[in-house]
Amino acid sequence: MRIDKLAVIGAGTMGHGIAQVFAQAGLQVALTDSNAKVRGSALARIEGNLDACLGRSVTDRNGALAVLERITVTPDLDEAVSAVDLVFEAVFEDLELKRQVLREIEAHCAPQVILISSTSGYRVRDLAVALDHPERFLALHFWNPPYVVPVVEVMPGAHTLPEVVDATFALLQKAGKVPALVRKDVPGYVGNRLQHALRREAIALVAEGVASPEDVDTITRLSFGLRMPVVGPLETVDLAGLDLTQAIQTYLLPDLDRSTAPKQLVRDKVGRGELGVKTGEGFYEWPPGRAARVIRRRDEALLEMVEWLRGHDLLGAPSGQAEAPVEEPRHNE
Ligand SMILES: NC(=O)c1ccc[n+]([C@@H]2O[C@H](COP(=O)([O-])OP(=O)(O)OC[C@H]3O[C@@H](n4cnc5c(N)ncnc54)[C@H](O)[C@@H]3O)[C@@H](O)[C@H]2O)c1
């Protein structure tokens, strides 16, 4: 299945970045959004991202210009999806809206056009019910910012054709991404299940007064968080020993938070309008300008880290597998 042209529906946080990823891979991209302001700022946001990539995934200003020229922003969904090989929906995380947009896309596309949802974790079967041709549909979970973060979770549904999955893998690899297959249609796939298990405990620790939000974040960032780009959690289990993991989990697991609903602390904050950056207060105070500084620092650090990982052949399988044996060190938690 040849993919030369694609469309992205929704040009928000993820949509504009996803459009950029594939334009950087040489594809023609049509981008649309129902919000005129979002459409109007899309190319400038992509240009800003490309500036950050100069000297890395984008060689120079001419390269950046060529990427921008491959992206067409249009107000009409039907125009965006006409004559493309693949369509991404990247609209709000709202199941009914996503179903409605998928139906609309399908109404304007030939049955062989691949359809992709960029959901954070709705089950594929819950989205595919909207389609007459679920065999060309799957979900791809990109991570923010999509033009920086290498991994993309690939979640086929029960009806997805193997050639659709293969073509999607090939497309992601062409775009320099690291596709990872999710084998069961579970909500949240792999990444968000892990991330929200961590957030549940982080919020519980603050709610119970065990540590401040600042200390929870510092402990996470500067301890196991620091080593995660190089050594994953299961590789760490092996390094430390399954016997040690068993010993710790025997006394610790019964004490971890097992809430099946958002904590009262979160519900209270939402009730008071303390939503985080968008209202100026959440777990932290967010005076004007602070979020932009944090995001810029995050993206610069991530771009450098990805370069480092690429240089050390670590954008793929766990570390050390292809290397010559060295003397075994002792390793603990
Ligand atoms: N933000 C993240 O960190 C992140 C990470 C991974 C996945 N996702 C997922 O990506 C998807 C998009 O999230 P986002 O963060 O980019 O949201 P966003 O709010 O930044 O952007 C969504 C865009 O969709 C547009 N839209 C809504 N209805 C539309 C319609 N009918 N037609 C065309 N455009 C429409 C909105 O105007 C908006 O600009 C969601 O499913 C989300 O769960 C988000």
Image (cartoon, grey):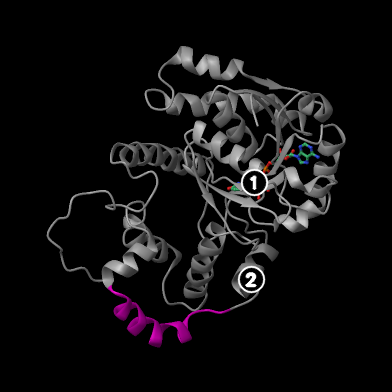
* SS state under label 2: loop
Image spot of residue 313 (x, y percent) = 31, 41
Most frequent secondary structure within the magenta stretch: helix
Q: Compared to 8, does 319 lie above or below?
A: below
As drawn, is 18 to the left or to the right of 285? right
Kindly tell me whether residue 38 is visible in this rendering. yes
Q: Compared to 211, does 20 lie above or below?
A: above
Q: Is mark 1 within 8 Å of ligand 1?
A: no
Q: Quadrant of residue 327?
A: bottom left
User: Hey, what amino acid is under mark 2?
Assistant: Pro
As drawn, is 14 to the left or to the right of 228? right
User: Residue beneath label 2, please?
Assistant: 262
Residues packed near mark 1 inside 10 Å, few (<14), some (14 to 19) or many (20 plus): few
Q: Compared to 188, does 48 lie above or below?
A: above
Kindly tell me whether residue 333 is visible in this rendering. no
User: Residue beneath label 1, please?
Assistant: 162
User: Residue placed at 32% from the left, 65% from the top?
Assistant: 236
C-alpha distance separating marks 1 and 2: 37 Å
Q: Quadrant of ligand 1?
A: top right
User: Residue placed at 33% from the left, 84% from the top?
Assistant: 247
- Magenta segment boundaries in residue numbering: 241-258
Image spot of residue 307 (x, y percent) = 34, 36
User: Hey, what amino acid is under mark 1?
Assistant: Pro
Task: Count the marks.
Answer: 2
User: Residue placed at 31% from the left, 56% from the top?
Assistant: 227
